Image (cartoon, rainbow, N blue to C red):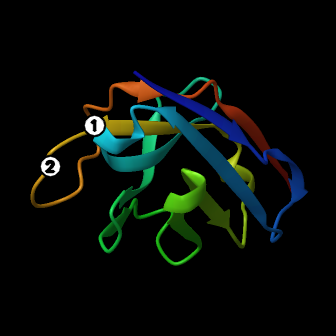
Amino acid sequence: QVQLVESGGGLVQAGGSLRLSCVASGRTFSVYVMAWFRQAPGKEREFVAAARWSGGTTAYSDSAKGRFAISRDNAKNTVYLDMNSLKPEDTGIYYCAARLGPIYGSLPRNGYGYWGQGTQVTVSS
């Protein structure tokens, strides 16, 4: 089992920045990919970004590319999502997710088996 706990959400004005954190515990040695998803009110949950736990490869949604950055600190079992130039349409609950491996090739945008409880991000116009 892998447990995930997110933090860092809040209320920010458009154009501002936030850093989300996700601390993983449990069978972290089996984790191959960590990702961030979000769910806006009335919409389905969507992929935002992913990173290989061992480092190197990252992937972003079109809406996140150029504004968001995913990173990880293996010593702290933590993955981050730095969000810049935030827009009102970035509002939603942000979830951290983990997928066990091995995983080869492109980072997956679905099939994650472990999820955090979510952290609310609200961007005001």
Which label sits on residue 39?
none
Q: Position of residue 35 (x, y in %)?
A: 43, 48
Drawn side of residue 40 relative to residue 27, left or right: right
**Which residue lies under the disc numbered 2?**
103
Q: Position of residue 61 (x, y in %)?
A: 40, 59
Residue 52: quarter of image: bottom left
Which label sits on residue 110?
1
Choose between 2 and 88: the one closer to the eye: 2
Drawn side of residue 10 relative to residue 64, left or right: right
Q: Position of residue 102 (x, y in %)?
A: 14, 46
Residue 49: quarter of image: bottom left
Mark 1 lies on a secondary structure that is loop
Residue drawn at the location 73% of the way across and 64% of the way down: 86
Tell me the distance, in whole angstroms, between the alpha carbons under discs 1 and 2: 12 Å
Amino acid tagged 1: Asn
Q: Residue furthest left?
A: 104
Pointers 1 and 2 in contact (C-beta within 8 Å): no
Amino acid tagged 2: Ile
